[in-house]
Image (cartoon, rainbow, N blue to C red):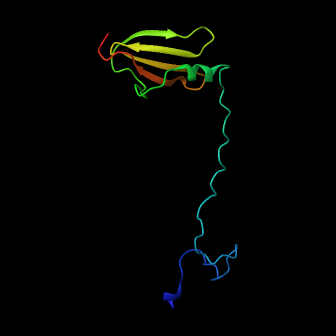
Amino acid sequence: DDDDVEVGPPRPPAGDGDDGDDGDGDLVGPPAPPAAKKRKRKSLPFEKTYLDALPCSEMYEKSYMHRDSVTHVSAAGAKSDFIITASRDGFLKFWKKTATTGVEFVKVFRAHLTPV
């Protein structure tokens, strides 16, 4: 009779589920957390005006660093959160200061085809 001995906790009787489901597709584990609330993004009074005033063309691309030595850095006024950097290879990059990340990339413009 040693073959009839079960090891471990007793199994529940078949068909005795607490949710009435037949067991197909039951999820295992804790439930997923609720979706995170979106935080409202702080914006400057004329931020859209600044962004709309930037030139838009195929000469723009998205890049987070200069490929050559930075030659110029300019802040766009005391009350503005925009910074413009220029590098020796002719690229201008536009940045915006933020409270959360420090500096956020906006756009890049190729001003010269040859080094300055």
- 114 relative to 43, above or below: above
Total numbered badges shown on the rendered structure: 0
Q: Quadrant of residue 23?
A: bottom right
Looking at the image, the residue that sits furthest to the left is 114
- The quadrant the C terminus occupies is top left
Identified at 54% across, 81% down, the residue is 6
Where residue 71 sits: x, y (%)? 38, 9
From the viewer's perspective, tell me whether residue 104 is left or right of residue 19: left
Q: Quadrant of residue 69?
A: top left
Where residue 115 sits: x, y (%)? 30, 13
Where residue 58 sits: x, y (%)? 41, 28
Identified at 59% across, 65% down, the residue is 27
- 60 relative to 5, above or below: above
- 15 relative to 110, above or below: below
Query: Which residue occupies the foreground of this view, 13 or 49?
Result: 49
From the viewer's perspective, tell me whether residue 68 is left or right of residue 10: left
Query: Which residue occupies the foreground of this view, 85 or 28?
Result: 85
Identified at 60% across, 69% down, the residue is 26
Query: Which residue occupies the foreground of this view, 111 or 81?
Result: 111
From the viewer's perspective, tell me whether residue 66 is left or right of residue 2: left
Identified at 64% across, 51% down, the residue is 33
Where residue 61 sits: x, y (%)? 42, 28
Query: Which residue occupies the foreground of this view, 82 or 33?
Result: 82
